[in-house]
Amino acid sequence: MNKLLLTFLILLFANLLSGQKLISGEYDSGMRLSYDTSSNILTGYFESYTGLDEETQNPKFSCIFYIEGKVTGKKFSIKTYYPEDKKDDMISGTIEIIDNKTIKISLPEEHGGCWNVQHFADKPEEFGLEKKTTWTQIRYIDNPKSYFYKDQSNTNRTKIYLLKGDIICVDKIANGKAFCTYFGKKITKGWINISDLNKV
């Protein structure tokens, strides 16, 4: 009887663990994450500000970094860096999946500016899902300029463009283009050339 009970508890625990997965979406405090189930690749972006410069009416401090990694279990390694400074700003850390709506991220040191905004090195920081999305990737512009297109063709280019380092959230990829959303002063949606984006 005891063996049967132990076997049942082990199976139950295993099922609970296997049921935990990352969900693409907007998390609290400026965290956005995307999980591609076909490749197990996680991409994300953290952006938060604090303080106010009374002269310019802009925030005094910022904490901004890109996130990439491969989900290999409940806890896995990630690489984080400022999009325009991957080589010199690289900090490796971990993400732990607490449940379907909560993750913890830990870094051994702080990115520039984060000390005044959000600490990640003191202890693991917890983020909860606020809005589920259909994003398959979060990427950034890796060319000096990238234009939005109205569709997947190369003929219907708009006048709207993004600059190197700008972050986009990708819903789908087709015919060498990504349908994505850019969260700037206003939200912009459209198609962008995959060749203009960072590699994942």
Image (cartoon, grey):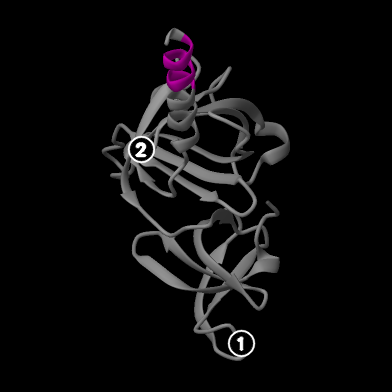
Q: Name the disc covering residue 67, or none.
A: none
Q: Nearer the viewer, mark 1 or mark 2?
A: 2
Q: Nearer the viewer, residue 43 or 30?
A: 43
Q: Amino acid at mark 1?
A: Ser
What residue is at 61 percent from the left and 57 percent from the top? 164
Q: Which portion, as a residue range, is magenta?
A: 3-10
Vertically, is 118 above or below 3?
A: below
The image quarter containing residue 146 is bottom right
Q: Nearer the viewer, residue 191 or 103?
A: 103
What residue is at 65 percent from the left and 32 percent from the top? 89
The residue wearing badge 2 is: 101
What residue is at 41 percent from the left and 23 percent from the top? 125
Vertically, is 185 above or below 86?
A: below
What residue is at 66 percent from the left and 41 percent from the top? 85
- Please tell me whether residue 9 belongs to the stretch shown in magenta: yes
The residue wearing badge 1 is: 153
Residue 19: x percent and y percent?
A: 45, 37
Residue 137 seen in the figure:
yes
Q: Is residue 148 left or right of residue 68?
A: left
Looking at the magenta stretch, what is its main secondary structure? Answer: helix
Residue 92: x percent and y percent?
A: 64, 27
Residue 171: x percent and y percent?
A: 49, 64
The image quarter containing residue 71 is top right
- Secondary structure under the numbered disc 1 in the rendered image: loop
Vertically, is 32 above or below 12?
A: below
Vertically, is 124 above or below 68?
A: above
Q: Amino acid at mark 2?
A: Lys
Residue 64: x percent and y percent?
A: 49, 38
For the residues labelled 1 and 2, the Cα–Cα distance comes to 37 Å
The image quarter containing residue 38 is bottom right
